[in-house]
Amino acid sequence: MAGDSGKVKEIFQHWDRDGSGDISVAELTRVLNKLNPQFDQAACQKMFSCMDVNSDGSIQYDEFINWLTSSDSYKGAKAAILMDGKGAGGKADAARKAKLRAKYARLDKNGDGKLDFVEVYDFLQKRYPQMTLPDLRFLYNCADKSHDGILDFYELLDMLMNVPSQKADPGAAPPSQGQHPLSAALLRPDARDDIKAALEKEERDQKEWMEKVNDITSKMKEFKDDERRHKEFREAHAKVMREHYAKTGQLAI
């Protein structure tokens, strides 16, 4: 986030509509509703309370920075904040746009020229491994500037140009998928259906992974030599893990 300090300051000043040097509940609510119309008053107030550490009824710049760099449960909202303002698609050169168009075409499984959440879920999970599924859905909704439930190429481009990718931490526990502070912003029926489909897909991927591991274990019984069996198992296991990560973006345990 340090590399984005100039942009963060610009965003803070943009949110501070009256130029008072801090952000009020009304100013925060206006911005959050613009980012995601499903963000209701209760959710806005809850986020405001998390940011207003000294409880003086307004958010100062230092509080804003501290909240953005903290490790609480609003990762999707923090990422979406970076998309506030003008689109960044114009910053991509022709070669980058061509590469991203190819990526868009690969993600568009049914070839209809648009991406729904299920189509883009694996890609988002791989790019932002620290986010929970509700975080990813919230980020997707914010990227959907036309609010039609799908992402066109330029909406995806703006998200990729504005929100940096994250590094996966192999030693970290998987993000909790329990009750989430952004859940109030995900009440649309199509959002629930998409999240259910994404969770079912994740469950199928995990089941497929376990079947492959069990298959490897069975095959290892064919080798009588312990050293040979250990070597074959490590190679087969590593291959399956690479395939699983390439497909799902998850480091299976």
Image: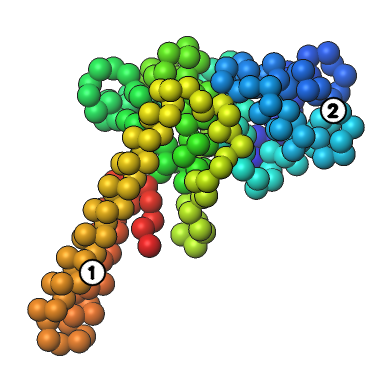
On the image, the x and y values in percent for residue 183 come to: 55, 33
Q: Can you see residue 39?
A: yes
Q: Is residue 129 above or below residue 13?
A: below
Type of the residue with mark 2: Ser
| Location of residue 99 by image quarter | top left
The residue tagged with tag 1: helix, strand or loop? helix
The residue tagged with tag 2: helix, strand or loop? loop
| Location of residue 196 by image quarter | top left
- Specify the quadrant that holds the C terminus: bottom left
Q: Nearer the viewer, residue 225 or 217?
A: 217
Q: Is residue 231 above or below residue 183?
A: below
- Specify the quadrant that holds the N terminus: top right
Q: Is residue 86 left or right of residue 168?
A: right
User: What is the C-alpha distance between the residues marked 1 and 2?
Assistant: 57 Å
Q: Residue at x 51, y 50 (%)?
A: 175
- Residue where numbered disc 2 is placed: 58
Q: Residue at x 89, y 32 (%)?
A: 56
Q: Which mark is residue 235?
A: 1
On the image, the x and y values in percent for residue 153 come to: 38, 19
**Foreground mark, 1 or 2?**
2
The mark that comes first in sequence, 1 or 2, is 2
Q: Residue at x 63, y 18 (%)?
A: 33
Q: Is residue 45 above or below residue 234?
A: above
Q: Is residue 71 left or right of residue 144?
A: right
